[in-house]
Image (cartoon, coloured by chain):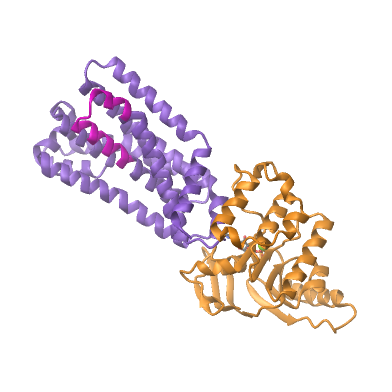
Chain colours: A orange, B purple
């Protein structure tokens, strides 16, 4: 479904993504992990076309994303911090996105209703708390029933109950056969949700494993151990 | 995704802050005031021209950089939707230029047209729109290339200061420094390299009082003669409009959001 071949990205002289190769199929939840600054957000933005890779090729459903924008119909993206114009109302934002994606394709109002977005559609974006913006952002991400969901730290900033609901929703969407790529720092979440775990360090894929749910009783701990090893090797380098 | 829809969102976004309206009303006050105090239409137009040459580039530059910096989230939001990057770029630029030009036409040309519509008025309208177009393009280029808002606005302001004030000073210095050489032609070329001076010369040529208005105007009339001069001037103005826009476009297509 998503195919990245030899992706390199520089910010000036800083080499953020180093020869990333990934092949990701649908019907699974992929956890993208790694310390702050390891390049997770940049990689997701490359897939979205918000950041343009310096070399390599990304394909979504077999078609190159270069000079292409239609493929974003297939993607629901929840950025790490919501990008909303500050001076407009929640309902204007929703209206704009609906007009762009087609009024009729807005079919999934589950999160919208659960988070009670209806109650503050008349508020200006600038008057919302960070958590409320995240809720609007997630409601919009799921609203269009996209085949691919790219969620950059979706539960950060949400209250525990809302985060729980988000996780339920993510699982539900996976069961419909969608691809969900999620970044998170919460190991429990990784254990609970993901089918595959990709560990990024310093712009390189350092670990890439399938989580078979039949595995050890204490997966969170074993994942933690592996990460600690990675951190150590990183520090001593 | 059709571009008109995006253009509509952007124009609504521009109109949402009251700057454009304020600018229009301000221009109206100026043109009405100058008309009131000038005895005839030529004098009124010359006074208005001097204001236009300073104000239009300044407002265009400030307005566009502030808008582009404030639209960062809006652009990011659109970019993560199925919308073409180039559509967003041209919609932003067109939205800005339309807003600024309409303000200028409503604020300056409309009041002056009560004197009757003359060729000079049409020239004034054209050059005012060109100045909006050119300085918007420069400003968009600078704000796309510079991530820091204060720095970007600073560079834009310097550009305005350079073309409006410093350039003429430099021209004079060159003129006096090389007084012994026949520099007429070179002076004309140097003048055309500045869109503000070029606009001034264009109007003054039409008013036929350029001989009274300093070196650049007088030289221009001598060397260029009316029709060719005017044709060349507009060609140069078009070049000035396209060049920064082209570089802004290239920058935007590669920018990391
Ligand atoms: N627009 C940018 N310009 C320059 N450097 C950037 C930009 N965006 C991110 N970076 C840098 O790239 C690195 C990776 O950032 P990011 O992808 O956000 O990491 P992560 O999401 O894993 O925390 C960081 O060092 C960050 O400072
Ligand atoms: Mg990140």
Residue A205: % across, % down: 66, 77
Image x and y of residue B137, in percent:
38, 48
Q: Going by the image, does B117 lie left or right of A235? A: left
Q: Is residue B83 magenta?
A: no
Quarter of the rendering containing residue B90: bottom left
Indicate whether B71 appears above or below B36.
Answer: below
When the figure is inspected, residue A115 is found, relative to residue B70, above or below; the finding is below
Residue B215 at least partly seen: no
| Magenta-colored span | B110-131
Is B184 on the left-hand or right-hand side of A28?
left
Q: Position of residue A4 (x, y in %)?
A: 57, 77
Q: Residue furthest right?
A: A217
The percent coordinates of residue B162 (x first, y second) are 34, 39
Residue closer to the observer: A57 or A195? A195
Q: Residue at x 76, y 70 (%)?
A: A172
From this view, report whether residue A70 is shown above or below residue B97.
below
Of all residues, the one furthest to the front in this rendering is A104
Prevailing SS of the magenta stretch: helix
Q: Residue at x 40, y 48 (%)?
A: B94
Quarter holding residue B41: top left
Camera-side residue: B151 or A6? A6
The quadrant of the picture showing ligand 1 is bottom right
**Residue B174 in the figure: left or right of residue B163:** left
Q: Nearer the viewer, residue A203 or A215?
A: A215
Image quarter hosting the C terminus of chain B: bottom right
Using the rendered view, name the quadrant where residue A108 is placed: bottom right
């Amino acid at each position: 479904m998503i195919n990245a071949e030899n992706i390199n990205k520089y910010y000036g002289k800083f080499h953020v993504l180093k020869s990333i190769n990934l092949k990701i199929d649908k019907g699974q939840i992929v956890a993208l992990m790694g310390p702050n600054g390891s390049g997770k957000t940049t990689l997701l933005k490359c897939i979205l076309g918000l950041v343009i890779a310096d070399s390599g090729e990304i394909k979504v459903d077999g078609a190159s994303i270069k000079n292409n924008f239609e493929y974003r119909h297939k993607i629901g993206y929840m950025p790490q911090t919501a990008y909303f114009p500050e001076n407009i109302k929640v309902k204007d934002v929703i209206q704009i996105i609906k007009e762009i994606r087609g009024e009729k394709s807005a079919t999934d109002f589950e999160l919208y209703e659960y988070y009670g977005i209806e109650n503050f559609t008349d508020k200006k974006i600038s008057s919302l708390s960070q958590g409320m913006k995240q809720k609007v952002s997630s409601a919009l991400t799921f609203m269009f029933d996209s085949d691919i969901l790219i969620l950059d730290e979706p539960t950060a900033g949400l209250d525990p109950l809302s985060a729980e609901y988000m996780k339920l929703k993510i699982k539900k969407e996976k069961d419909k056969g969608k691809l969900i790529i999620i970044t998170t720092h919460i190991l429990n979440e990784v254990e609970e949700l993901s089918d595959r775990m990709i560990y990024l360090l310093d712009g390189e894929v350092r670990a890439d494993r399938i989580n078979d749910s039949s595995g050890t009783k204490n997966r969170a701990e074993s994942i933690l151990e592996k990460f600690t090893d990675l951190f150590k090797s990183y520090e001593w380098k | 995704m059709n571009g008109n829809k995006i253009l509509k969102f952007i124009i609504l976004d521009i109109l949402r802050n009251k700057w454009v309206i304020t600018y229009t009303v301000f221009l109206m006050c100026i043109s009405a005031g100058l008309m009131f105090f000038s005895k005839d239409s030529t004098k009124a137009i010359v006074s208005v021209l001097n204001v236009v040459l300073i104000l239009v580039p300044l407002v265009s530059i400030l307005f566009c950089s502030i808008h582009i910096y404030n639209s960062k989230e809006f652009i990011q939001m659109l970019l993560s939707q199925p919308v073409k990057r180039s559509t967003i770029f041209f919609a932003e630029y067109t939205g800005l230029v339309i807003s600024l030009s309409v303000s200028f036409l409503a604020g300056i040309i409309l009041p002056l047209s009560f004197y009757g519509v003359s060729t000079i008025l049409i020239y004034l309208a054209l050059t005012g729109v060109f100045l909006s177009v050119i300085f918007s393009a420069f400003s968009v280029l600078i704000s796309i290339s510079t991530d820091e808002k204060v720095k970007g606005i600073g560079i834009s302001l310097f550009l305005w200061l350079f073309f409006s004030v410093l350039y003429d000073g430099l021209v004079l210095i060159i003129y006096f420094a090389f007084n012994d050489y026949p520099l007429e032609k070179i002076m004309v070329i140097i003048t055309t390299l500045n869109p503000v001076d070029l606009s001034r010369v264009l109007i003054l040529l039409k008013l036929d009082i350029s001989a009274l208005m300093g070196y650049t105007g007088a030289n221009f009339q001598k060397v260029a003669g009316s029709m060719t001069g005017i044709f060349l001037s507009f060609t140069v103005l078009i070049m000035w409009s396209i060049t920064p826009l082209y570089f802004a476009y290239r920058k935007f297509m590669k920018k990391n959001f």
